[in-house]
Image (cartoon, grey):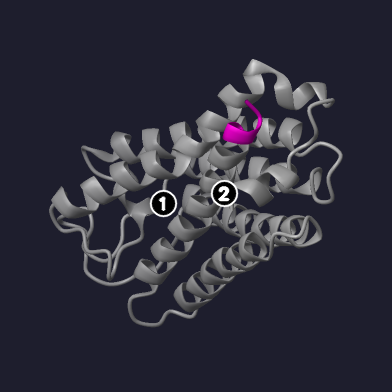
Amino acid sequence: MTTTLATATPTSSTVGARRPQTRTLLALGAAAMPVWTVVAMTQALTREGFSLLRHPFSILSNGPLGWVQITNFLLVGALTVAGAAGLRHALRGRTGGTWAPRLVRLGGLGMMAAGVFVMDPADGFPVGTPVGPSTTLSWHGYAHMAAGSITFLSFIAACFVLARLFRQSGDRTAAVLSRVAGTVLLLGNGWAMSGRAAGSLTLAVGVMTAMAWISLVSARLRRTAA
């Protein structure tokens, strides 16, 4: 996939792809998914009362240690926005080279907004919260849901735009993987929104899959932009 991803990268005559800051921005974008996963999963495994089968990662922003997940949202969102700037330079002039970075940037901004507007406690988390879904939502709970929707839809769309880019550059494998990543998040989010069992788990898997692919694309483009 390295060779074909290089096809999606502008030629050596493109100034933006040669700039050191482009590689730095792409490196920051590549770090987004690993940082998110390590911080979120560490909390999921260690914080009392949390179950990924019932609770989304967002709910970790509550409680005495809520600042950890809030910071995770803000930091990873900022890394994603930086990575989008790197993608804009590296993909300039290519089909999808305008909209893929824009969508990734919007997803990063959505993550930052989700960190600012905290999800309401629910279903026994943090410990002491009544079991079951919240009967009412605060204004910041609604804002968090809106920010999350923007993030998910942006990442889904970005994956499909990247699929078109790779298809036109002749990289069928990367095109298929882009579609798979977008579809996993689309289905995971749809399952969660339907209120079915383990919806928080399917959503988490979907988000991490799409983020992993976008981070991988950033890492590969960083190598070919050297």
Against 149, is 112 above or below?
A: above
Q: Is residue 166 left or right of residue 95?
A: left
The residue type indicated by label 2 comes to: Ile
Identify the residue shown where x is 55% and y is 64%: 181
Image quadrant in which you'd find residue 102: top right
Mark 2 element type: helix
Against 70, is 187 above or below?
A: below
Q: Which residue is mark 2?
A: 214
On the image, the x and y values in percent for residue 130 come to: 21, 65
Q: Earlier in the sequence, mark 2 or mark 1?
A: 1
Image quadrant in which you'd find residue 134: bottom left
The prevailing secondary structure element of the residues shown in magenta is helix
The reply to whether dot 2 and dot 1 touch (C-beta < 8 Å) is no
Identify the residue shown where x is 34% and y is 41%: 69
Identify the residue shown where x is 80% and y is 33%: 11
Is residue 93 among what the camera can see? Answer: yes
On the image, the x and y values in percent for residue 163 come to: 70, 61
* Residue located farthest toward the top when viewing the structure as drawn: 20
Image quadrant in which you'd find residue 125: bottom left
On the image, the x and y values in percent for residue 84 come to: 65, 37
Q: Is residue 96 left or right of residue 174?
A: right
Q: Residues within 10 Å of mark 2 (few under 14, many from 20)?
A: many
Of 9 and 47, the residue lying toward us: 9
Against 14, is 141 above or below?
A: below
- Residue 119 has which mark? 1
Q: Which residues are magenta?
A: 222-226
The residue type indicated by label 1 comes to: Met
Residue mark closest to the camera, 2 vs 1: 2
Q: Is 175 a magenta residue?
A: no
